């Protein structure tokens, strides 16, 4: 069997591309980390791209446990980015106790965390960006979006804290998704003052089906014309409340993407980069179907891959989330062609990379008005709390328990978003931690009756969004999180036949399709949802618990094949 | 919702006549196809139907059908209680043989477009559109 590495080399040779991997594996083998090692990079070619994405307003370093279950639909199962744990380590030749293993996989997360510490922090990201710019002053810094959302400070300041930080970082272009949950008017207000490009070739107005934002921007870098085409999250009006941006329509709009590629090539672009929030599997399919894209900087699905994935001659780059990683991609572009690349997924280990003093001061200033509220300790956890993965994480179980107890419900539903950092056993739970799992502009907790049949229908619909074999028909996040409910899911079955054996856990009885159950949930996309904010509900519950300990859920049985 | 699928939007269609079809309470898609073709065989042809993969709003799903040599185009939403969306005839002065409309969709289905060509033959194309409850952010 041909190995992935050989395949990469074979396809590079065949396409006259010369790829040189960065030094991450050497760093990974080291037990003691140094900033110089993490940043070490032999400048290559004539263009440098810096990619960050899905920061979710995490200004400070975080714990972020990667997924232990990330199945993907059948056609791409077992391929990146759907490898986890040991399979991921084996695929990329990483040592199980290495720093990169801690950064990229879930196994031994707690133990390795003691050795390697938190990751991210925009002041550390600034240090990395500045170091790259010291090598290559005209490097392009591209932000894949989900930037102005995800924390208490971003919620309270309507994204202004992140706008200020990203302006200081010197972004050249961004695209978007959760940004629109601030409301279209607020987005337009920010964009009108933004010193860089806000791109989305696939954002149209609903009245006349005309483009609303710039589809692309052309840059001159190292004697090369670089086109950056923006692709916002195609299903923003479906996954998020469209009433907050009622005049906007999104969609994949593959044909327009092809038209934009042709247009920028016609304007002399030597290098075509798509700054995307499609999600990895959608990008993989789009890269195969749209001709002429050199690089896709992927986002949305929070995947981090230590090497580019090649689709034909297109490089797919996955740079993780929450400020954990910064990708540096150096390219050799000659005669209107990408001839070679050098790539490094730079892990932002917060205890190793020195914070940039100016950025640290700016972050402190942004947090100062809220600092007392942010840092108040609400309770403690004795177990690892995390969310990321296809099904319930322990943080989700805690939130679902809070919903059922505080709102007197039999069943809880919590959205399967990919954002939300982790907490280590023994950690204090601050108000900031709770907001980082829940902060959003539509956080009201609803309480209403749903029949067993309605619950089944909702689970089937969401499962179809996640496991549809064609990525173009997938939308949104991971599976909705459930409390008080067990079920079996056959992920490869057709819609309507995936979910079975639904159990009402409190009674131990099978869910009655005709009976009405009292359900509490949050993040409804419907306008006018009434109820308390989810962060207040969770805070009240944790405060009463004092210490929490949440075991891994065994209420969902996952069947593949 | 007060929206009716009959509120069609015709854009940039010089010389186009839109026929609004009377409501039929129980019409099935097979019968509507046969009524359009008169039972003639459906062949391959340059008929393009464009619709979103997933509907942002099931009450108003934009669908564009383009067919350079079409005399008439019929759009069907087979899983709707009333599957017939519209039938459009292009006159001799039509500049572009293309129509865009918005249709209301009851559920996930293949939206079907049929065209009668200038030479009297019939062609067909379909686009799968998913209607979902949404949410779950990502």
Image: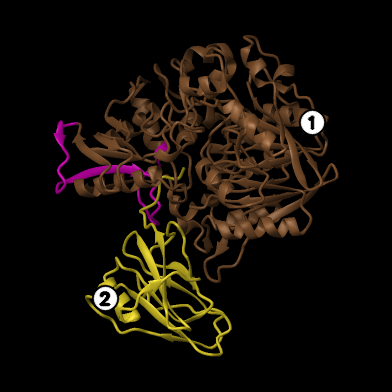
Chain colours: A brown, B yellow
Quadrant of the drawing holding the C terminus of chain A: top left
Determine the residue positioned at 56% across, 38% down: A56
The part of the image, by quadrant, that contains residue A545 is top left
Residue assigned mark 1: A44
Instruction: Give residue B31's mark.
Output: 2
Determine the residue positioned at 39% across, 51% down: B134
Q: Residue furthest bottom?
A: B92
**Secondary element at image label 1:** loop
Q: Which residues are magenta?
A: A506-535
Q: How many marks?
A: 2
Please say whether residue A470 is one of the residues in the magenta stretch. Answer: no
Q: Position of residue B47 (x, y in %)?
A: 48, 71
Q: Position of residue A520 (x, y in %)?
A: 29, 42
Residue A147 to residue A548: above or below: below
The part of the image, by quadrant, that contains residue A44 is top right
On the rendered structure, is A117 left or right of B52? right
Nearest the eye: B47 or B59 = B47
- In the rendered structure, the residue with mark 1 lies on which chain? A
Q: Residue furthest right?
A: A223
The part of the image, by quadrant, that contains residue A200 is bottom right
**Secondary element at image label 2:** helix
């Amino acid at each position: 069997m041909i190995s992935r590495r050989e395949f990469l080399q074979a396809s590079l040779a065949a396409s006259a591309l010369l790829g040189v991997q960065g030094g991450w594996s050497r760093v990974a083998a080291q037990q003691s980390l140094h900033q110089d090692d993490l940043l070490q990079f032999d400048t290559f070619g004539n263009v440098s791209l810096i990619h960050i994405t899905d920061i979710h307003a995490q200004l400070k370093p975080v714990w972020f446990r990667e997924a232990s279950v990330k199945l993907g639909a059948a056609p791409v199962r077992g391929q990146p980015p759907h490898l986890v744990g040991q399979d991921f380590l084996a695929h990329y030749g990483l040592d199980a106790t290495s720093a990169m293993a801690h950064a990229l996989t879930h196994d031994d997360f707690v133990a390795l965390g003691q050795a390697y510490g938190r990751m991210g922090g925009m002041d550390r990201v600034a240090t990395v960006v500045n170091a790259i710019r010291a090598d290559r002053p005209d490097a392009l810094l591209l932000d894949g979006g989900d930037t102005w959302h995800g924390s208490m400070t971003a919620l309270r300041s309507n994204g202004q804290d992140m706008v200020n930080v990203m302006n200081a970082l010197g972004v050249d272009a961004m695209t978007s998704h959760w940004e629109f949950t601030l409301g279209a008017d607020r987005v337009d207000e920010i964009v009108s003052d933004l010193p860089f490009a806000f791109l989305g070739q696939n954002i149209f107005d609903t009245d006349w089906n005309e483009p609303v934002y710039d589809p692309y921007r052309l840059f001159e870098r190292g004697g090369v014309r670089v086109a950056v085409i923006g692709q916002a999250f195609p299903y923003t009006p479906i996954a998020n409340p469209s009433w907050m941006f009622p005049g906007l329509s999104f969609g994949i709009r593959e044909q327009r993407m092809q038209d934009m590629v042709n247009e920028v090539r016609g304007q002399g672009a030597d290098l075509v980069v798509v700054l995307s929030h499609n999600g990895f599997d959608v990008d993989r399919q789009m890269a195969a179907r749209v001709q002429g894209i050199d690089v896709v900087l992927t986002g949305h699905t929070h995947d981090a891959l230590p090497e580019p994935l090649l689709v034909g001659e297109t490089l797919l780059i996955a740079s993780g989330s929450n400020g954990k990683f910064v990708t540096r991609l150096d390219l050799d572009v000659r005669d209107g062609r990408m001839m070679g690349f050098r790539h490094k997924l730079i892990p932002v280990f917060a205890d190793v990379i020195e914070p940039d003093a100016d950025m640290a001061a700016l972050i402190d200033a942004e947090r100062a008005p809220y600092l007392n509220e942010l840092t108040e300790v609400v309770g403690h956890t004795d177990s690892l709390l995390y969310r990321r993965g296809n099904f319930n994480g322990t943080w989700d179980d805690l939130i679902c328990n809070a919903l059922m107890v505080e709102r007197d419900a039999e069943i809880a539903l919590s959205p399967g978003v990919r954002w939300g950092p982790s907490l280590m056993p023994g950690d204090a739970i601050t108000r900031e931690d709770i907001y980082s799992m829940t902060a959003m502009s539509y956080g009201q907790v609803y309480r209403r009756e749903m029949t067993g049949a309605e619950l089944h229908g909702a689970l089937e619909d969401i499962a179809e969004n996640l496991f549809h074999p064609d990525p173009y028909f997938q939308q949104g996040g991971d599976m909705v999180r459930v409390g008080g409910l067990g079920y079996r899911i056959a992920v490869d079955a057709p819609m309507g036949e995936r979910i079975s054996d639904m159990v009402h856990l409190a009674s131990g009885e099978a869910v009655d399709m005709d009976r009405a159950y009292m359900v509490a949930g949050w993040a409804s996309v419907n306008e006018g949802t009434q109820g308390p904010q989810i962060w207040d509900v969770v805070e009240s519950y944790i405060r009463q618990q004092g210490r929490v300990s949440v075991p891994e859920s065994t209420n969902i049985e996952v069947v593949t094949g | 919702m007060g929206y009716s699928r009959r509120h069609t939007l015709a854009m940039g269609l010089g010389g186009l006549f839109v026929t609004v079809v009377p409501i039929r309470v129980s019409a099935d898609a097979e019968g509507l196809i046969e009524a359009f073709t008169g039972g003639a065989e459906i062949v391959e042809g340059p008929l393009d139907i464009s619709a979103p993969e997933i509907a942002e709003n099931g009450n108003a799903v934009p669908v564009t059908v383009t067919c350079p040599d079409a005399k008439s185009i019929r759009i069907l939403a087979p899983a709707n209680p009333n599957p017939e969306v519209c039938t459009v005839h292009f006159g001799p002065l039509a500049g572009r043989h293309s129509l865009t409309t918005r249709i209301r969709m009851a559920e996930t289905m293949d939206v079907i477009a049929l065209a009668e060509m200038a030479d009297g033959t019939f062609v067909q194309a379909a686009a799968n559109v998913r209607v979902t409850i949404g949410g779950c952010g990502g």
